Image (cartoon, rainbow, N blue to C red):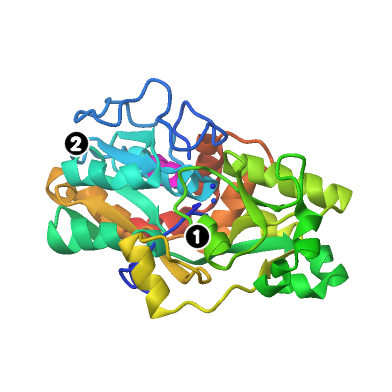
Amino acid sequence: MVRRCAATLAAVLVFAACGDDDSTDDTNPPGTEAPGTDPTATEPAATEPAATDPAGTDAEPPASGEGIVLAVNPWTGSAVNAQVAKVVLESELGTAVELIDIDENATWPGLDRGEIDAVLEVWPSGHAEDYATYIDEKQTVVDLGLLGPTAKIGWYVPTYVVEEHPELASWEGFQDPDLAGLFATAETGDAGQFLMGDPSYVSYDEQIIANLELPLQFVVAGSEAALITAIEQAVGDEQPLLLNFWQPHWLQSQVELTEVELPEVTEECLASAAADDGAYECDYPIDELYKAASVGLQEKNAAAFDFLSALQLTIEQQNEIAAMIDADGMAPEEAAAAWVEANPDVVQAWLA
């Protein structure tokens, strides 16, 4: 999926690497809206506050402002954040929450128009222009602060690949057609396959391949789930695989992947990414994930605005919930509710 800057990209860039609402599954084709939802709707569907009390308090949830709409981008981490926020907002603050599946690029115009109230995971390396346009210039979107995780998109291969061919620990090894050819498939012919997840992810892989003149062919798998399947199959068969992937991701703790060294990030590459001129030929920068909201959210629902500003998850917490969804097969809303119920102290800190 992030396929995904502000801060380090410092307001220059944001990607792509790894969402769902109550009625959709994270394996839906990314970049599409959930069935039955309308991302252009200005009036979110009202729902009754949850009857359960997952944060561990007995008080009746107070009514606190209008219902809100949260964006869910097509990777599990985005779904985790939104589902956790929904559980707490509905059970603790009496705020109805609608989740809509939408790709990361379309999220910003939705925030600009006030049709989406917040997005809880922005990868700055792919959204420098959006930050400059909507937050700095138009001031229709506000930065809600850091989510918590420090993230990194990159090129990955299973570790056994570099153990057998140490040259492939660096992009320079892929200049050799014979080594690149180890990754060839029936689809790519003599060229090595480079596998991407969701087609909506912000990525520079095609540019990197072209500008470094590597004998690789860019192939889109279709989703984060498809990437996970490809990794698991390749590792199970001990076959070569080169793909766009990211940290943090729960699968990284279960499968040994090695990040391929790409050319160092330069100011020229950051400028190229911001200008979208096709000249990018560097590694991905480190991303400090952040949250963003429509400027009207604070007046619309001050309690929700304050809560979303305070909400933070560690890498370990996000990975724990993501693994419940992707590895254990739990529905995103069920995984979020179970985690919230098991972590009342964390939740109360967000509400304080």
The magenta stretch spans residue 327: no
Q: Quadrant of residue 82?
A: top left
Closer-to-camera residue (95/105): 105
Residue 238 can be seen, yes or no:
yes
Percent x, y of residue 197 = 58, 46
Category of crowding for the residue at label 2, using alpha-carbon neighbours closer than 10 angstroms: few (below 14), some (14–19), many (at least 20) = some
- The range drawn in magenta is 83-87
Q: Main secondary structure of the magenta part?
A: helix
Q: Quadrant of residue 40?
A: top left
Q: Residue at x 87, y 48 (%)?
A: 237
Q: Residue at x 33, y 57 (%)?
A: 291
Name the residue type under label 2.
Glu
> Which residue is denoted by mark 1 in the rendering?
207
Residue at 38 percent across and 79 percent down: it is: 267
What separation in Å lies between label 1 and label 2 (alpha carbons)? 44 Å
| Residue found at the very far top of the displayed protein | 36
* Type of amino acid at the residue the image marks with label 1: Gln
Q: Earlier in the sequence, mark 1 or mark 2?
A: 2
Image coords of residue 56 (percent x, y): 45, 46
Badge 2 marks a residue whose secondary structure is loop
Residue 66 numbered tag: 2
Residue at 45%, 43% (x, y): give it. 200
